[in-house]
Image: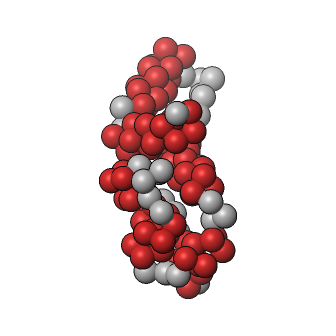
Amino acid sequence: MAEKPTTLSEQKRLAILEAARDAFREKGVQGTSMDALAGRAGVSKRTVYNHFPSKEALVLQLLAQFQETARQRLHVKYNAGKPLEPQLLTLVGSEIELACDPDYLELARLAAGHFFY
């Protein structure tokens, strides 16, 4: 789990990311303005741009955050002293669980829609 933000700047950055995630879900990336994000996050538009130069940068940061969370969740270490099959089953089960995660699916849909269409 991520540490609590300690500085005002970190708090604002997290507020912007949360606002972006919610706004992108509701209106899509294209349908969300930086002004709307600033208002939702309770910061100025300049503050949004100080942290993220574009909506693309926001989408990429949201993907990076999810990837880090997934990496932490899937931390399965191979143990040569144990049978391979149960270890592989655990790994595959974790991957399937992650691939079916509603937050992951929504974020993947948003990113694909924004970058590929």
Residue sticking out furthest to the bottom? 8
Q: Is residue 36 left or right of residue 5?
A: left
Relative to 95, does residue 114 appear above or below in the rendering? Answer: below
Q: Position of residue 115 (x, y in %)?
A: 57, 39
Q: Residue at x 50, y 20 (%)?
A: 88
The residue depicted at 48 percent of the width and 50 percent of the height is: 30
Residue that protrudes farthest toward the top in the picture? 85
Residue 15 placed where, x, y %? 46, 72
- Left or right side of 57 for 108: left
Residue at 46% over, 68% down: 37
Q: Is 87 or 106 nearer to us in this picture?
A: 106
Q: Is residue 8 left or right of residue 109?
A: right
In percent of width and height, residue 103 lies at 38, 45
Quarter of the image holding residue 77?
top right
- Could you say which is closer to the camera, residue 112 or residue 68? 112
In the image, 111 versus 34, the foreground residue is: 34
What is the total number of numbered labels drawn onto the structure image? 0
Instruction: Specify how the rendered protein is coloured.
Output: secondary structure
Is residue 15 visible in the rendered structure shown here? no
Figure check: 18 above or below 103: below
Q: Foreground: 76 or 9?
A: 9
Q: Position of residue 7 (x, y in %)?
A: 58, 83
Whether residue 109 is visible, yes or no, is yes
Q: Residue at x 48, y 37 (%)?
A: 113
